[in-house]
Amino acid sequence: QVQLVESGGGLVQAGGSLRLSCAASGSIAWINVMGWYRQTPGKQRELVAAIITSGTTNYADSVKGRFTISRDIAKKTVYLQMNSLKPEDTAVYYCKVVSAPYNYWGQGTQVTVSS
């Protein structure tokens, strides 16, 4: 059974920083993609950042230049460094791991940015 455990969310003032972590455990033979999504009430879950096997990264336009995704393959862990946070970054952040053909999701961690 695969489990994703997220940590690092919390309350921060605008302009501040947070670092999210997501560690995968269980039987994952190969990881294709690791990523972060976020969701606010009444809205669809949206991609924030992703990193694929080759190391290529992809970011939502709204976070480019402020957020950085990275990973530790040996630890099966993905990170999201969030700098210059804005109130509109407030959301529940979810980690996603793709091990084709399966998708695994974390339980979500709340990020709240106060103005």
Image (cartoon, rainbow, N blue to C red):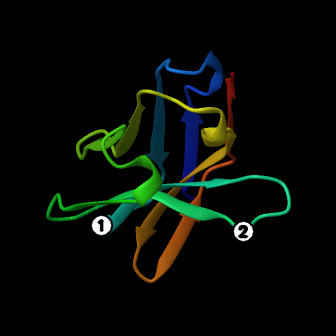
Q: Quadrant of residue 91?
A: top right
Q: In front: 46, or 53?
A: 46
> Can you give x and y, in whole percent of width and height, for residue 34 in the image?
38, 58
Quadrant housing the N terminus: bottom right
Taking the view exactly as shown, the residue that stands out farthest to the left is: 54
User: Image check: 8 left or right of 109?
Assistant: left
Inter-mark Cα distance, 1 to 2 = 28 Å
Q: Nearer the viewer, mark 1 or mark 2?
A: 2
Taking the view exactly as shown, the residue that stands out farthest to the bottom is: 101
Taking the view exactly as shown, the residue that stands out farthest to the right is: 42
> Can you give x and y, in whole percent of width and height, for residue 90 in the image?
68, 38
Image height of 42 relative to 8, above or below: below
**First in sequence: mark 1 or mark 2?**
1
- Numbered disc 1: secondary structure: loop
Image height of 99 relative to 62, above or below: below
Q: Quadrant of residue 77?
A: top left
User: Image check: 21 left or right of 73?
Assistant: right
Question: Amino acid under label 1?
Answer: Trp
Question: Amino acid under label 2?
Answer: Gln
Instruction: Specify few, some or many for label 1: CA neighbours under 10 Å numbering under 14, 14-19, or 20 or more.
Output: few
At x 38%, y 38%, the residue is 79
Quadrant housing the C terminus: top right
Identify residue for label 2: 44
At x 57%, y 32%, the residue is 86
Would you say the residues marked 1 and 2 are in contact, meaning their CB atoms lie under 8 Å apart?
no
User: Image check: 108 left or right of 74?
Assistant: right
Q: Quadrant of residue 29?
A: bottom left
- Numbered disc 2: secondary structure: loop
> Can you give x and y, in whole percent of width and height, for residue 42 in the image?
85, 62
Identify residue for label 1: 30
At x 57%, y 37%, the residue is 6
Instruction: Specify few, some or many for label 2: CA neighbours under 10 Å numbering under 14, 14-19, or 20 or more.
Output: few
